[in-house]
Image: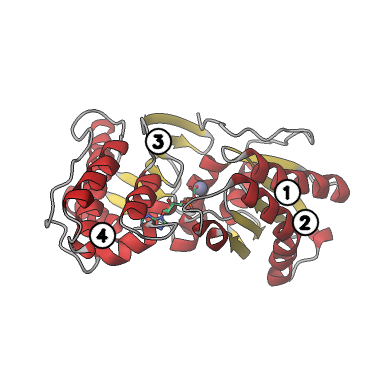
């Protein structure tokens, strides 16, 4: 009998559900982004997010089943994000998953969202298993992770303040761009000169931790002093600073740890400047860099389903039905 996993993701402002067949055949991947609802506030408002998850979660799950052509009764496993994320939003998705698990008598695997991002790689490149070195760059996290095996992770470095995506969003806000600003900076940067202005490269050459809050402050003062600077050039120069720090640390860690397979996941992995730079470096250094396709980089439930399926099938894991959401759940 075909093994279908239903994945549910609701840790921030995306209500998402997906149906996975077996280990990595994606049958549907439905994402309802609340970004427009939060844009007017310049960032995610947790209470607004929770309320909209409540409104959207059942229609999104139904849409994922319809798109997959699968009946609810055919679902054999439920995977849902338990953290890290916003407590209200997490509770909505996890509670629905617990209810479905009970009603269908199907096991539940409560998934770590960060591990979920890593599993986006398994969906696109099942033929490239660990070990590899991963850079997880999203709105909430900047992690360099040594993935020894699925389920076995060593944190090599992380941010001391803002995450990479947060830096994009905050810098974009200062530039007058809407939320989320990452994709807009990416677009503007394509028409700007990355060498036009010189912004700081925080902690470059100083270990594997990151720091982006100083860069944001540098942008603030720069814009105060140069109110007529060409926005495309500011965006390109800012992006160049972030990309250089991320790329430099990833490749330095790869050299030191003697790892030739690199994987980049999370929303910022969608950045075209970062992707190009990493592929250039990979060619030069004889390494391989893998970035999942864009929809799998951003928050989605396909990655959650893939992670749940792996943990259930190969690590023999099953979560208790009263597993609680954990907003600050660490990866390792
Ligand atoms: O992984 P994700 O969808 O959600 C979190 O888990 O945080 O990442 C969202 C983040 C946002 O900060 C957004 O601005 C950033 O990813 N982002 C980008 C791009 N697309 C999304 N940043 C830079 N360039 C992009 N093309
Ligand atoms: Zn995420």
Q: In the picture, residue 182 is in which quadrant?
A: bottom left
The residue sitting at 21% across, 47% down in the picture is: 241
Question: Mark 4, mark 2: which one is toward the viewer?
Answer: 4
Q: Which residue is mark 2?
A: 75
In the rendered structure, find residue 46 and report the number of the disc placed on it.
Answer: none
Q: Which residue is mark 3?
A: 145
Q: Which residue is mark 1?
A: 78
SS for dot 3: strand
Q: Is mark 4 within 8 Å of ligand 1?
A: no
Q: Which residue is mark 4?
A: 276
Q: Using a 10 Å C-alpha cutoff, classify the residue at mark 4 as few (fewer than 14 neighbours), some (14 to 19) or many (20 or more).
A: few
Q: Determine whether, in the image, residue 193 is placed left or right of residue 260.
A: left
- Quote the CA–CA distance across marks 3 and 1: 26 Å
- Quote the CA–CA distance across marks 2 and 3: 32 Å
The residue sitting at 18% across, 61% down in the picture is: 228
**From this viewpoint, is residue 158 visible?**
no
- Quote the CA–CA distance across marks 4 and 2: 39 Å
- Say if mark 2 contacts mark 1, CB within 8 Å: yes
Q: Using a 10 Å C-alpha cutoff, classify the residue at mark 3 as few (fewer than 14 neighbours), some (14 to 19) or many (20 or more).
A: many
In the rendered image, residue 332, in percent from the top left (x then y), is placed at 50, 28
The residue sitting at 54% across, 63% down in the picture is: 36
- Quote the CA–CA distance across marks 4 and 3: 21 Å
Q: Using a 10 Å C-alpha cutoff, classify the residue at mark 1 as few (fewer than 14 neighbours), some (14 to 19) or many (20 or more).
A: many
Query: Looking at the figure, which quarter contains the N terminus?
Result: bottom right
SS for dot 1: strand
In the rendered image, residue 322, in percent from the top left (x then y), is placed at 78, 33
| Up-down relation of residue 193 to residue 321 (above or below) | below
Of the image marks 4 and 2, the number of the one nearer the N terminus: 2
């Amino acid at each position: 009998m075909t093994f279908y996993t239903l994945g549910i993701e609701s840790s921030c402002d995306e209500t998402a559900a997906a149906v996975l067949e077996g280990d990595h055949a994606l049958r549907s991947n439905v994402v309802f982004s609340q970004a427009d609802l939060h844009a007017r506030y310049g960032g995610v408002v947790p209470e607004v997010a929770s309320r909209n998850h409540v409104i959207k979660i059942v229609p999104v799950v139904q849409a994922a089943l319809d798109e997959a052509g699968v009946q609810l009764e055919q679902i054999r496993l439920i995977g849902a994000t338990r953290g890290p994320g916003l407590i209200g939003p997490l509770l909505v998705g996890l509670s629905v998953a617990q209810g479905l698990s009970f009603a269908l008598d199907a096991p539940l695997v409560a998934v770590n969202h960060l591990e979920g991002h890593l599993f986006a790689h398994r969906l696109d490149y099942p033929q490239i298993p660990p070990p590899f070195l991963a850079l997880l760059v999203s709105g909430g996290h900047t992690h360099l992770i040594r993935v020894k095996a699925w389920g076995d992770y060593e944190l090599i470095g992380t941010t001391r303040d803002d995450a990479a995506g947060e830096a994009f969003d905050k810098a974009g806000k200062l530039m007058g761009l809407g939320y989320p600003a990452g994709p807009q900076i990416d677009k503007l940067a394509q028409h700007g000169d990355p060498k036009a202005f010189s912004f700081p490269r925080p902690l470059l050459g100083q270990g594997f931790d990151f720091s982006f809050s100083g860069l944001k402050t540098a942008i603030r003062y720069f814009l105060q002093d140069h109110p007529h600077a060409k926005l495309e050039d500011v965006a390109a120069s800012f992006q160049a600073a972030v990309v250089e720090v991320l790329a430099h640390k990833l490749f330095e860690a790869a050299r030191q740890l003697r790892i030739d397979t690199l994987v980049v996941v999370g929303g910022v992995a969608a950045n075209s400047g970062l992707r190009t730079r990493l592929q250039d470096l990979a060619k030069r250094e004889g390494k391989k860099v893998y970035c999942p396709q864009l929809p799998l980089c951003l928050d989605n439930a396909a990655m959650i389903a893939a992670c749940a399926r792996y943990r259930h099938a190969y690590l023999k894991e099953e979560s208790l039905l009263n597993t609680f959401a954990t907003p600050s759940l660490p990866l390792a």
